[in-house]
Image: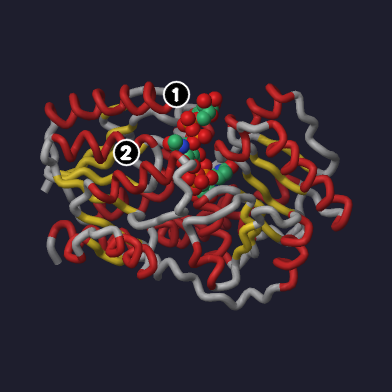
Amino acid sequence: MRIAIILGTRPEIIKMSPVIRECERCGLDFYILHTGQHYSFEMDRVFFEELKLPAPKYNLDVGSGMHGEQTGKMLSGIERILLEDTPDVVLVQGDTNTVLAGALAASKLHIKVGHIEAGLRSFDRTMPEETNRIVADHISDYLFAPTQNSKKYLLAEGIPEERIFVTGNTVVDAVYQNLEISKQIRKTLERFGLEERGYFLTTVHRAENTDKKERLAGILAGFEQIYAEFSLPILFPAHPRTVKMIREFGLQVPEGTQVIDPVGYLDFLQLEGSAKLILTDSGGLQEEACILGVPCVTLRDNTERPETVEVGANVVCGEKSVILCVKQMMQVGKGWKNPYGDGDAAEIMLKELIGN
Ligand code: UD1
Ligand code: UDP
């Protein structure tokens, strides 16, 4: 069986890394097709280097753009490659435009599609990711759902049960595989002048948070309040989209918040694991905080990761005041159970694909 792994953004590289390693371990015939949706060194190459992943065989270099333009370029580029270098199955992960294009191109060519992280739903169609998830799920042949909850959503949408496999999330594999390596080779906290549990960590990049001035200003004002209340620094490795919008809107980063460039995964895992609390709108961070036992406040109106809220690891801020959410989550104990599996999701998926 020949497998094409299609990816294009930071979270896809990280969450596909256990699948890539498992393909290598099993000696499978596979190649990586990178769409180039992310291309800055710290959003792309750093992960291939740090995680020692094989270089993509193809890179479409599509770069940034409007949704239609970006997705359209990917679609035609992926189709061309799949026609020349035809796999038996295409694997995509998550909910980005890369996933939509990869699944659609393969499906139209009657190539089997495996969707990793299937069945997540925010039930908010204003998010571009929700459309991507729904379309990818409905044209996939193998739906690798991380939890029973995501399987339930898929069944409710009429997807046949025999296509759905509950596997856990490869993010657990990625955390377990890389955290120890990271601690052995990096003294991250020292480098940033931070102390264990002596800082907050934040990331913000969702369109709904970055693209409206009032919304982004409101988030920064929340950070100001947190610093005034707790006198702990807030480290903010900022997505390029967010940096661009802070500049465009002429916003000031408040005292106590330190904006830095995005960091590689090995540093970032340590920053997450030692934080007092994480504030984020990232999907991956909600999961990783939960896995690492660090409380999380989600800076959004909803989440497609309700499992993290149900186990008590996360609260969705919505209209509530961020400071109240932070105070609430600083009270919680850390004994919750990680709902995303045991770190063998990639192995389970590949067994399903190639037969046990
Ligand atoms: C994309 C995904 C989002 C995912 C996120 C992960 C879609 C619709 N969105 O959002 O679901 O959570 O990736 O990080 O697929 N930029 C750079 N360098 C890069 C990449 C982006 O400077 O390497 C800047 C550009 O100004 C670009 C902007 O970031 O216009 C947004 O990039 P884009 O890939 O369109 O969306 P993300 O916000 O990264
Ligand atoms: N991440 C990283 N460095 C950073 C910020 C995030 O390595 O500076 C990792 C993080 O650990 C997680 C992933 O990037 O695995 C999340 O990506 P992002 O928030 O961009 O996307 P989302 O998960 O929301 O789709």
Residue 178 in view (yes/no): yes
Q: Secondary structure at mark 2?
A: helix
Q: Look at mark 1 in the image and give the residue it sits on.
A: 66
Q: Which mark is residue 100?
A: 2
Q: Name the quadrant of the C terminus.
A: bottom left
Q: CA distance from mark 1 to mark 2?
A: 14 Å
Q: Earlier in the sequence, mark 1 or mark 2?
A: 1
Point out residue 161 in the picture as x, y percentages from the top left corner.
20, 65
Residue 46 in view (yes/no): no
Point out residue 318 in the picture as x, y percentages from the top left corner.
65, 54
Left or right: where does residue 304 sit relative to residue 227? Answer: left
Left or right: where does residue 277 sit relative to residue 240? Answer: right
Q: Which mark is residue 222?
A: none
Crowding at dot 1, Cα within 10 Å, few <14 / some 14-19 / many 20+, comes out as few
Find out if the beta carbon at label 2 lies less than 8 Å from the nearest ligand 1 atom. Answer: yes
Crowding at dot 2, Cα within 10 Å, few <14 / some 14-19 / many 20+, comes out as many
For the point 12% across and 44% down, which residue is it? Answer: 88
Residues 215 and 98: in front is: 215
Task: Identify the amino acid type marked 2.
Answer: Leu
Quick check: 225 above or below 240? Answer: below
For the point 65% across and 30% down, which residue is it? Answer: 243
Quick check: 121 above or below 214? Answer: below
For the point 67% across and 48% down, which residue is it? Answer: 202
Task: Identify the amino acid type marked 1.
Answer: Met
Residues 50 and 290: in front is: 290
